Amino acid sequence: MPDFEPILLRRINAGASPALDAYRADGGYRALTKALTEMTPAQVVDVVKNSGLRGRGGAGFPCGVKWTFLPPNHPGPIYLCVNADESEPCTFNNRILMDKDPHQVLEGILLACYATKASVAYIYIRYEYGTAYRSMQKAIDEAYGANLLGKNILGKEFSLDVYLHRGAGAYICGEETGLIESLEGKRGWPRIKPPFPAVEGAFRKPTVVNNIETLACVTHVVNRGADWFKTIGIPPDPKNPRDAGSYGSKLYCISGHVNKPCCVELPLGISVRELVDKHGGGVWKNRKAKGCIPGGISMGLMTEAEFDTPLDFNGPGKVGCLGLGTAAVTIFDDTTSIVDVLYNICRFFAHESCGQCTPCREGTGWMMKMLDRIRQGHGRMEDLDILDEVAKSIGIMPGTTICGLADGAGWPVKNAIAKFRPELEGYIRGGQKTSMSLAVVH
Amino acid sequence: MAVVLINDKPVDIGNERLNLVQAAAKAGVFIPHYCWHPALSVVASCRMCLVEVGDKKPDGTVAMQPRVVPACQTPAKDGTVCITNSEKAKFSQARTLEGLLLNHPLDCPVCDKAGECMLQDYSYRFGKAQSRMIDPKNRPANKPDIGEHLSLFTDRCIMCSRCVRFTREISGSAELQVINRGHHSEIDIFPGDPVNNPLAGNVVDLCPVGALANKEFLYKQRVWFLKSQKSVCAGCSTGCSIHIDHNKDIVYRIRPRENPQAQGYFICDEGRFDFPYINGKERFDRPLVKPAGERSEPAESAVAWETALPDIRDVLKKSASALAAVVSPMLTVEEAYLFAKLIKGFSPQATLYLGWVPNVGKDESFPRDRKGNPVGPVQFTIRAEKCPNRRGVEEVLKHFQGEVLGFDRLIADISSPLPTGGEGAGVRRRPQALYLTAGYPPRLGAWLNDEQTKTLSTIPLLIVQDLAPTPITQTARYVLPAATFAEKDGCFVNHANLAQQIRWAVRPGTMGRTDGQIFLSLLGRRGLIQATKIRQELAAEIPFFAPLAVGDLGEFGVKLG
């Protein structure tokens, strides 16, 4: 297969300047001009819908379909919330886009607002992303100066204000309703649904929440058309009528025990093995991989034997993972203890659970405590069964929580118990103790 | 017409907008819940009310949802199928309870809530007997100074957030919040800003576990020793429905009782915490008499009821034509009726005056923000009129006298040159004898100023019926003990003409008698007072009170007028 010509990373890989002039010189804002002069908002929605573009934030919901959920003929205002609270561990694709090519993102935001008739866009940006914040702010200022934002953009009947809002460092504020609550100045507690944000979101108005990478894709979909977009990636599985396909390219983040951690843009459907061997420079220190986290830690774990699974919206699910997630692959080598991996994951979720729903609040803390005990050599065999039961009973899928954080917390545990049980049992039976010193956050 | 199937049992909920917890209650099925409260917003976060839900299609098939859902958040619609007793629902509820107990200290033996604790009750009914967690529990520090009357046992909290929502949605003062995340979440206040709003005590009732405690009640009495009486608060003219919790003739606690016709679900702290005077040691419990002609002499002697009442009857009869009586708005309708009948029985010329109507400040409505501005629709009002039965007494006075003469009028009449004797209907006389009923709670302070006291003491024969010694009782010839609302039966009519029944919870001391009993004896009627009988009697006599003919006014009271 010939090397894929990157789309989203084209300018970034070429080392192009993030400034407005350079972006325009490279053909930037052509999609916006096209949309504003030649297309109605409904046509933009149709193009995005036909392209099969699915959300890049993790859940993979078709972007165009989401836009159609807005109440028709709403008197407004309608809001667009841009989810730049990229907090999934090992995920950094949005950061690269915002750092190095902010206008590409901004153009996507403009197109999305034009399509959804949103009059204000809020970019909810993770607190830790200082560079991205400054870079986005600069781009916004430039855009206001060039009449790309503000009143009557490019002389047309379309006005848009974009605000940057910095988060305060909570993972849960990446959940769309948690983000909206936080944006409103409240505690980042996800809301009960219904009503869904499309009906009643930020400030009780219809709201669309989209990921940065999704919006960057929108730019190119509008520019080059739905048919072009469909030439990339994997078409729907004809045997699965509910599969919406995995079209387009994706920014894969490769990290962990590899020689060359990086972010590469590839068509959806690439396998972990190819990512590691070809793009990540292989497993470090000439070791073998034991497994990986295929798409951010909430998606579960893959063993080395499953590395040939294609990373598209369906692939990881076939080997028991939750989904594609953010496509941030983290490799761990064969010297890594699965107990340490699990403990670290559970510690993260216990720390980040918002504390609203009982099963998640107590379940994540309990799993962490159990794994800490196992890690210190005091595990019991029945702990694995309890862990499995807790992991399976918390989350939005069994219906016991409001948002999906608990599913993400449970998935790696239940994957680990299913896939690495012999190692876990051996660890407990042998009374092994960890050699890692992980700070304990209680 | 909407029919909901609860555990295969059809329930018609009509056109009501209910959630599944409420719909199931109609079917007699209890769905356990913590965070949901009918007066507060739905957060569906405790996940205690998880049930299986489905839809019954017109063709009779049932499509169940694959996951459990919180019943509090699921609207009951026509054809909704709700299963609360399946393995899946029971497992989910048991898992939630196990989660709640993971970090709970299980200190029931020293917890005030034990015995009326939802965590205990649900664990027994829906939970597991043992915890599977062997790891150390989180032990957050207690916060005993979270409010003037409130103490927070942080480790017992199950994070239902009812208290937080109460301060945001009902009182509007928003002192409480959740701090920290995950299993370290805690309820807390903003530093230096305790929960001292006038409705703060309600968070204790809302707390389903022993986390928020009422400091006035803390460690005073185990709840299983308490007996509860349904009554009405006498603190203001709102007339909140309450429970009086008592044991061995001591009132320990006052709690709100739900009454959609009166106040809703809550009561104010003024009503909740102003009961110690009922148990007060200084209260009169028997008649006191001063020898005639020795008014300045402070020495009074206690006499037996059997001696005092005939005496009083005699002296009143002698002064009948220049007799005045003050009917306190603290009296029940029945008592006011008996009293008026008694006084007018001596002479039609005897004059009835309405007792002092305490007005303190302005009506306070909630929710209101921290600056006192109203926010949103009114959820609760504390009235400025700090007596329970002005409306009822006024109607009695109107019936017996055609007009309502205020207390100021009495003072004016005493000092004015009205005739002191002689015949002639409709001519007001300068009072030569005064029977004054009071019974105001001490929180209202001295209600007579020095000048008024002086004016009143110019009356040759002064009979005062009050709770405890005051300047006016010291100048009175006869002092009779009054009873508080917790000691008598009867009814109060609130500001909106809602008549509600009060019921006695404790006895007015070993020798004490209720006001109604005193009037009954003075009227020469035999036996103990039966408020229901009197109520039916006055309902037949006074048209305004006709709806009271039902006798028992039920839990929520009867609308008049």
Image (cartoon, coloured by chain):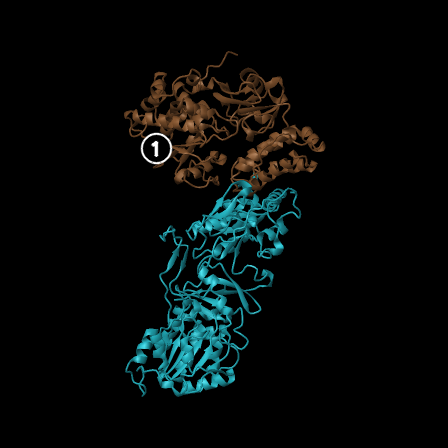
Across and down, in percent, residue B275 comes to: 49, 66
Image location of residue B521, percent across then percent down: 48, 81
Image quadrant holding the C terminus of chain B, namely bottom left
Q: Is residue B534 visible?
A: yes
Residue A141 is left or right of residue B516, and the answer is: left
Is A286 above or below relative to B35? above
Local packing at callout 1 (Cα closer than 10 Å; few below 14, some 14-19, many 20+) is some
Q: Chain of mark 1?
A: A
Look at the numbered disc 1 and give the secondary structure of its residue.
Answer: loop
Say what amino acid the circle numbered 1 marks.
Answer: Ser
Colour in which the image shows chain A: brown
Whether residue A42 appears in this view of the structure is no
Nearer to the camera, A19 or B559 = A19
Task: Pick the residue in front: B560 or B213.
Answer: B213
* Direction top: furthest residue: A2
**Residue to which mark 1 is pinned:** A119
